[in-house]
Amino acid sequence: MVTTAVIFDLDGTLAYTIEDITTAINKMLDKLGYDKRTLEEVLGYINKGARNLVRLSLPKSVQDVEFIVDSALGIYEEEYEECFLEKTKAYEDVISMLEHLKDMKVRIGVLSNKQDKFVKPMIEKLFGKDTFNVVMGQGPFPTKPNPACALHMCKAMGAKPFRCIFVGDSDIDIKTALNAEMTAIGVSWGYRSVEVLKDAGAHYIAECPEDILKITGEIVERNNAKKKKIKAPRAEKATSAEQKMAAENSAEPREETEQGTE
């Protein structure tokens, strides 16, 4: 049996998080003396990291004033640390879906543009400590849609990229999957529309967590069937994405200037 892996986005895919994010943003804005944002406005600002979220939440007149953005980002992180588990919850049937994937011997991971210091405790609180094989928030690797971290996780789980599935609710997630040459599944229950996911190039759209099980089951069978057809052991060539990552990351992973909390 070959190894199949599934990498999940966090916000809007595994968990409903937007209310706590909005709370932190509005407390930040209140401290700075700016008007608050609606939940719908904040939804439009997420997916590209905390600095981008904070910048867009500020009035347009100060969005390019970096020392104000710096100050606002620090306040936002302090406020989010106080509330990031208050209303955040796992989506219905997601926990059952994850358990079934593990029963299928599929390896599972989480990759988020949210900072790692928030991702790991959130995952542990919502899904348990040992549910996932690998959990990574923003840290030494570039943020999605750069494929470097997804490819790193894939390797850590012992799977080739073409045998990996990336599941997410945004165009950023779909682009990450395509950049890494993985199968891209978009979920319809998240923060972006199905049209956005299709336009980004999603291979599949999941209307419910059970759809992820069905699609993954089909891919596992296909992967195993391909393996049986190989008559003699042979080395598998690296994908172009892997080759590109090796060239760009021959040294230690670099630190990004843009911090990431979705």
Image (tube, grey):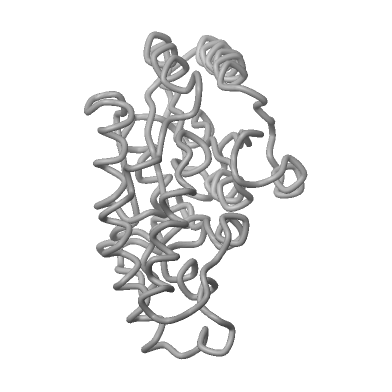
Query: Which corner quadrant of the image does residue 185 belong to?
Result: top right
Residue sitting at x 43%, y 54%: 21
Left or right of 128? Residue 204 is right
The quarter of the rendered structure image containing the C terminus is bottom left
Q: In this rendering, would 201 be left or right of 46?
A: right
Q: Position of residue 223 (x, y in %)?
A: 54, 18
Looking at this view, is 251 or 220 the one in front? 220
Residue at image location 35% in from the left, 81% down from the top: 70
Q: Is residue 182 above or below residue 77?
A: above
Which image quadrant for residue 17? top left
In x, y percent, where is residue 16? 48, 39
Residue in the image at 56% along x and 47% along y: 173
Q: Position of residue 24 (x, y in %)?
A: 38, 60
2 over 20 or under it: above or below: above
- Horizontally, residue 101 falls left or right of residue 85, namely right
Quarter occupied by residue 154: top left
Point out the image quarter for the N terminus: top left
- How many numbered discs, if any? 0
Q: Which is more toward the observer, 153 or 47?
A: 47
Camera-side residue: 96 or 103?
A: 96
153 or 173: which is nearer to us? Answer: 173
| Residue 225 in the image, given as x and y percentages of width and height | 57, 11
Q: Is residue 104 above or below residue 43?
A: above
